[in-house]
């Protein structure tokens, strides 16, 4: 049987069938629920990003940041724990501010319930410098100074010393200080393996007390007429010389300071009387010694040569005056 327009009708029915099939397929697909089977991904970062000390040690506080992402259902929660402690919910960055070896474990859960495998990261922090102690043994003429450094975290790298302001050098064995009349200073500090430096400490080693007085000799020289020069020679092998004091008739005139050995004092005598002159030497320890030859000195006295010269001078003047009178 022939139906007019049958070919077009057939094509139309086929077209409608395709549309219906696509519609049924679309409806079927849209009715199937979406499935999220992929867990989230969490990353950890440190600040500073790399260790700021030696041998991969941090010598400052470290900020820890966790960042979780999920491309489907989204991140629900992130957990972390430090060195095997209790799990905690991560809300914001946290600080590692104590010296320790740190292991940080972490993971996240998305809104579909997918649980990430536990991740971990580690770092080592040493924010405390070493501590150095000392002990000085009094060996008489030689003092022995022993240094000992400790560090509870990264360990001691080295101890450095400077003696009497000299160059810094690495400490290796006890320091022997030969004692003399002067004090000696030892500066020291230690550095740990992370790079932390201890503050500089100082030891002052003093010599044995000087109980011996200095030695002194004393003399007097006439400069002209009644002007005198006192001369003292003083020595001290212990603490060293400090000063010499000069006296006339037990009255203090003044002192001359310094290491010596020669000390001088000029004095003008106000009269022709005899006077007692003396010098007293003091060392740096305060010990003193006076000259033994305390002398009764007459400034206007003359020795034999001076007296003879004076007599001849007077004789000459006398004759010159007589001759002058005759000529007149």
Image (cartoon, grey):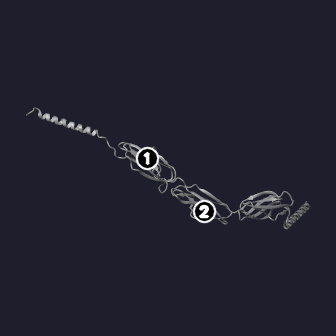
Q: Is residue 310 above or below residue 99?
A: below
Quadrant of residue 141 within the rendered picture: bottom right
Give the residue at mark 1. 79
| Outermost top residue | 4
Q: Residue 6 bears which disc, if any?
A: none
- Could you tell me residue 27's position as x and y percent? 26, 37
Q: Are marks 1 and 2 in contact (CB under 8 Å)?
A: no
- Give the distance between the C-alpha atoms of the residues marked 1 and 2, in whole angstroms: 51 Å
Classify 10 Å Cα crowding around label 2: few (below 14), some (14-19), many (20 and above). some
In-image side of 147 versus 62 (left or right): right
Give the residue at mark 2. 146
| Outermost right residue | 326
- Could you tell me residue 313's position as x and y percent? 86, 64
| Outermost left residue | 1
Tell me the quadrant of the picture where the C terminus can be found: bottom right
Q: Which of 152 and 259 lies nearest the eye of the viewer?
A: 152
Quadrant of residue 298 within the rendered picture: bottom right
In-image side of 296 versus 14 (left or right): right
In-image side of 67 versus 7 (left or right): right
Quadrant of residue 261 within the rendered picture: bottom right
**Residue located 76% across and 58% down the image:** 255
Please say whether residue 165 is visible from this viewpoint. no
């Amino acid at each position: 049987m022939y139906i007019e327009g049958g070919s077009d009708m057939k094509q139309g029915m086929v077209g409608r069938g395709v549309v219906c099939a696509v519609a049924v397929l679309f409806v079927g697909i849209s009715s199937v629920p979406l499935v999220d089977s992929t867990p989230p991904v969490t990353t950890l970062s440190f600040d500073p990003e790399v260790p700021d000390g030696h041998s991969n040690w941090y010598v400052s506080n470290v900020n820890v940041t966790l960042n979780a992402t999920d491309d489907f259902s989204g991140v629900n929660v992130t957990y972390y724990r430090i060195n095997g402690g209790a799990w905690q919910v991560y809300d914001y960055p946290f600080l590692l501010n104590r010296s320790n070896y740190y292991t940080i474990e972490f993971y996240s859960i998305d809104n579909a319930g997918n649980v990430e495998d536990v991740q971990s990261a580690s770092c080592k922090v040493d924010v405390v410098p070493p501590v150095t102690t000392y002990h000085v043994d009094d060996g008489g003429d030689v003092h022995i100074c022993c240094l000992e450094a400790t560090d509870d975290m990264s360990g001691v790298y080295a101890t450095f010393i400077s003696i009497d302001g000299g160059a810094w050098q690495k400490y290796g064995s006890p320091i022997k200080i030969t004692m003399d009349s002067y004090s000696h200073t030892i500066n020291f500090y230690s550095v740990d393996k992370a790079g932390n430096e201890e503050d500089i400490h100082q030891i002052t080693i003093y010599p044995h007390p000087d109980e011996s007085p200095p030695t002194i000799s004393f003399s007097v020289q006439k400069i002209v007429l009644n002007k005198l020069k006192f001369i003292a020679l003083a020595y001290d092998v212990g603490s060293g010389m400090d000063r010499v004091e000069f006296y006339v008739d037990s009255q203090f005139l003044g002192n001359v300071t310094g290491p010596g050995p020669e000390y001088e004092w000029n004095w003008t005598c106000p009269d022709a009387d005899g006077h007692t002159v003396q010098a007293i030497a003091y060392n740096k320890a305060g010990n003193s010694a006076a000259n033994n030859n305390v002398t009764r000195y007459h400034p206007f006295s003359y020795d034999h040569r001076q007296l003879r010269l004076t007599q001849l001078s007077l004789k000459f003047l006398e004759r010159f005056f007589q001759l002058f009178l005759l000529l007149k």
